[in-house]
């Protein structure tokens, strides 16, 4: 592919076979990967699709060129793949939603390619859609993910034992609870937990009693968080719009210090997500299905603390697996041949 | 009291005995009332406590003088009472929260008086606090109301048969579900339904697919509203942060027209409030307790439609009873003696 000879003084010493882009709403992360799937170099910029240097297609081009131009000068013709919101309707080019059940091969079969000004095409991964039966809970309202399916492909590649059956909880702005069976994603549910927390703190009456920049005692903050989780654990259907108001009254009546109200609200919202997510998991999968937490370490630990209030122990907590997932996607798309592995057809 | 003789050309012909102020967050409404509790004249301004003409105490003085100055010139020394957020920590003068169970007499006994620059004192009604046992649902988090207790005093005065036992649902920004027993308010729960709806439409991703100013077909909007209520009816604990996301996916997948998404979200949130509120009502009160809707007509009708999806029929739907409640408060405080009625002591 490339004709440049690596010189000893030029890192990385390992010749990359893939440039993988994890391109979300608020950031763009780029990974140079070798044939074993290892990361040989990585970079990031704040040029997520909602924060491009200029508007429109030119913004995608410039963000890509600024972050990866020299890499592609050095290794022209390197295969490039991308996952995340870059494939949404607001992205560089829209990649469709693939229906569940789906695996990495399904993603590859519906990928879309966009030609970049740097002379290389970029293969963009599709998202996933889960459309339950009309008589299922939620009246059969569909659900979508875009980006997490790539992380799951990476998690399953790194931990093949979970492919037979598992539930992956991926905390975030829009948390995802994804059910895996026989190597495929069979269903999922989105929880707007992180966005609800941010919007309520910033724009609702609940934020008014929360002081800016007042540090909270760590033990007291942990206790406030647990109180919120306990309220969620003891809740009954429909209770959340009422329980939220306690974030105000606990402050108003000085039963909770102002700097702890955020932790209470966080516990309440995460608790509601966990109560619902774990119930749906137990309904759809066997009782001994492992629950895995995937995502940023501190947030996963917070979810782990909340799960312990509910008496649930996650089987594992793992970091971002997007680079490995993008690698699997490139393999499935036939762009690269992995070292020491058989290409799945 | 006053020495001015009514002339034939000066409305109102009936001599007022009370000036009642319903002073909330976004508006100030003033009522001249006669000894029978009838409104002889009324006015309103947009000078709610968060929208005063100038900041601080001077703002309260000016808003009061602008709206009521000429009335008090004509009837100097007229007793003045006020209810609502004017008695909050952000109000003219803070009136405490009275503990449940409470009635109009309890409110009067803890009222606070503030001297106005017009030369008359204003008696401000306190709010109410409900502090359930620590082992009750919600971990015993306290709840508060301010303003609704006055409306309830009015509703019970107008409909004494409901005083023995009733549940009053008062839809709004912060809906209140208030339980009445033996003439007293025994408990209540606040639901942030209206504020959640506003904040999510304006500041969350859910609002992005909602077009501005596109009129919806009335029948289609009603059906979308009912779909939201049905999703709430079928929900299980913790489901709301997930179900909210359907407002996005139904639009994204074009299963619901963009101009209907607001109605779906409204039905979902109101539905959650009703599921929780009615369950709590049935738990705390007898099965045959009447449920009353109190508030603005169009919103009450919307709640009535949602209740019918849940198979619940409200016993009555009544408008704003704040003027009559302020009258009862003034009677209980000994400021006025009602005509043709015995003053409760």
Image (tube, coloured by chain):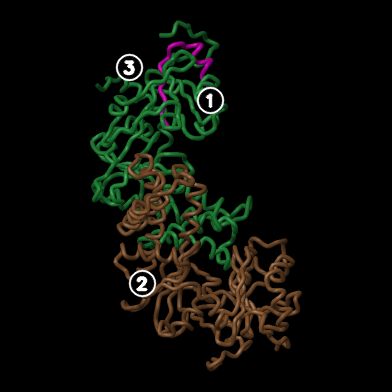
Chain colours: A brown, B green
Specify start and end residues of the magenta stretch as a single range.
B67-84
Residue wearing tag 1: B59
Q: Chain of mark 2?
A: A
- For marks 3 and 1 on the same chain, the one whose residue lies earlier in the sequence: 1
How many residues crowd mark 1 within 10 Å: few (<14), some (14–19), many (20+)? some
Residue sitting at x 62%, y 71%? A43
Which residue sits at x=43%, y=34%? B320
Quadrant of the image containing the N terminus of chain A: bottom right
- Which of discs 2 and 1 lies nearer the camera? The answer is 2
- Do residues under tags 3 and 2 come within 8 Å of each other at their CB atoms? no
Q: Is residue A189 above or below residue B219?
A: below
Q: Quadrant of residue A93?
A: bottom right
Residue B337 seen in the figure: yes
Q: Which residue is mark 2?
A: A314
Residue B315 lies left or right of residue B244; in this view the side is left
Whole-angstrom CA distance, mark 2 to mark 1, is 56 Å
Residue that carries the numbered disc 3 in the rendered image: B337
């Amino acid at each position: 592919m490339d004709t440049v000879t690596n010189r000893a003084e030029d890192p990385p010493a390992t010749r990359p076979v893939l440039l993988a882009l994890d391109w979300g709403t608020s950031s763009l992360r780029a990974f140079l990967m070798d044939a074993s799937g290892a990361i040989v170099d990585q970079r990031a910029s704040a040029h997520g699709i909602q924060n491009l240097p200029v508007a429109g297609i030119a913004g995608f081009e410039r963000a890509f060129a600024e972050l990866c131009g020299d890499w592609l000068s050095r290794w022209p013709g390197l295969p490039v793949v991308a996952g995340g919101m870059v494939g949404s309707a607001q992205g560089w080019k829209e990649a469709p939603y693939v229906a569940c059940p789906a695996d990495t091969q399904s993603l590859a079969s519906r990928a879309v390619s966009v030609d970049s000004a740097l002379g290389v095409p970029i293969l963009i991964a599709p998202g996933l859609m889960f459309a339950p039966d009309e008589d299922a809970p939620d009246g059969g309202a569909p659900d979508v993910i875009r980006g997490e399916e790539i992380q799951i492909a990476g998690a399953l590649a790194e931990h093949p034992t979970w492919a037979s059956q598992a539930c992956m909880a991926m905390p975030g702005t829009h948390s995802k609870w994804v059910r895996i069976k026989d190597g495929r994603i069979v269903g999922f549910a989105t929880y707007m937990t992180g966005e609800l927390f941010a919007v309520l703190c910033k724009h609702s009456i609940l934020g008014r009693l929360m002081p800016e920049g007042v540090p909270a005692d760590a033990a007291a903050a942990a206790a406030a968080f647990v109180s919120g989780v306990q309220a969620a654990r003891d809740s009954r259907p429909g209770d959340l719009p009422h329980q939220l108001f306690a974030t105000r009254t606990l402050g108003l009546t000085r039963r909770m210090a102002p700097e702890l109200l955020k932790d209470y609200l966080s516990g309440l919202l995460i608790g509601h997500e966990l109560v619902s997510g774990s119930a749906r998991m137990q309904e759809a999968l066997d009782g001994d299905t492992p629950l895995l937490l995937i995502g940023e370490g501190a947030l996963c630990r917070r979810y782990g603390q909340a799960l312990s209030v509910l008496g649930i122990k996650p089987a594992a907590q793992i970091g971002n697996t997007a680079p490995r997932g993008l690698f699997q996607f490139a393999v499935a798309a036939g762009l690269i041949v992995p070292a020491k592995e058989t290409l799945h057809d």
